[in-house]
Amino acid sequence: MRTIDLNRCLVRYAQGQCDACEAICPQGAVHQHVIDPKKCDDCGLCQAVCPAGAIAGTDDCAGALARTRHLTRQVLMCRRVEEAAPSCLGFLNRRLLWSLTRERELAIDISRCETCRPAVFHWLEQEIAACQQVLAKEGLPPIRLVRVHPREQAPAAPVVERRKFFRSLFHSATEGLQTLAEAQQTKLYAFDSALWIAAQGGEPGELFPQLTISSACNTCGLCTVLCPERALSMRQPEGMPKTLYVSALACSGCGLCEASCPVKAITCKKNGADVRLPADGGRGKHNVC
């Protein structure tokens, strides 16, 4: 289950035109910036393309990436392989992959994606390929595609006799109601890939958006107020004129600054993937795992 926080979504701005989540959803679960829980299969593709970190889900994506970084060998995998992993790797994008590979070699298991979620497989193939090209230019090791064998699952719970079951049920009514209430409280995690990348530090590359500020900039500061990722800041070093600074790591390429600039001094080159799905919408053989 995923939800869209309209307080962060670009549509709350006058110039904020964005339908990336609706365009990429293989289930057609997003309409007018609302996610239909009956259609959503929690693949995470909407999170991968959201430029404002406005989408929350049941997966702790930040926690999953943190665990990956602390593995002896960095390996990204889904819950079909590792119980503590995200339900799906659809939330990944090329900038996240690049940030992980900058530290040390990275491996990813997408061997089951094509039969499980074809749209996710198509997306990950595209993002990995883009990252591989830049890694090759930089002379860095490529992302390795692996197939990890799932760990043994915990043994199934023993079968309880009917009479014992009802006796236990009646004697544990209070505990049962409390457990039910806790189960109904679903915890959602917001994940903003741009903020996560910026927090890790490192160096941006070709895969990151590029903002160009022309001499027409009058340092009004409007863009710094509007930027959902706080990638723009106004600084005035001692003895120097006020200047607009850009954090390339934090920029998500949403284009809001370019659209809102009153003097048209900003140009945003996204350097990202086309979020539109292939002709079949990635819907063929899309199984829920």
Image (cartoon, rainbow, N blue to C red):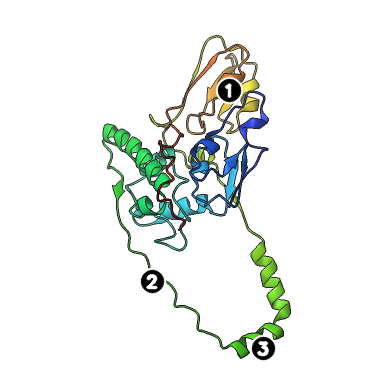
Which residue of the protein is positioned furthest toward the right in this rendering?
174
Question: Which label was assigned to residue 167?
Answer: 3
Report, in whole angstroms, how far the alpha carbon at label 1 lies from the one at label 2. 50 Å
Dot 2 amino acid type: Glu
Total labels drawn: 3
Report, in whole angstroms, how far the alpha carbon at label 1 lies from the one at label 3. 64 Å
Pair 1/2: label in front = 2
Above or below residue 35? Residue 266 is above
**Disc nearer the start of the sequence (1/3):** 3
In the foreground, 66 or 201: 66
Query: Which quarter shows the C terminus?
Result: bottom left
Residue 123 image point, x, y percent: 40, 41
Question: Which label was assigned to residue 257?
Answer: 1
Residue at image coords 54%, 34%: 51
Residue 85 image point, x, y percent: 46, 58
In the foreground, 124 or 135: 124
Question: Which label was assigned to residue 152?
Answer: 2
Left/right of residue 196 with respect to residue 164 in the rendered view: left
Callout 1–callout 3 Cβ contact below 8 Å: no
Residue 230 image point, x, y percent: 59, 31
Which residue of the protein is positioned furthest toward the top in this rendering?
216
Residue at image coords 27%, 31%: 137
Dot 3 amino acid type: Arg
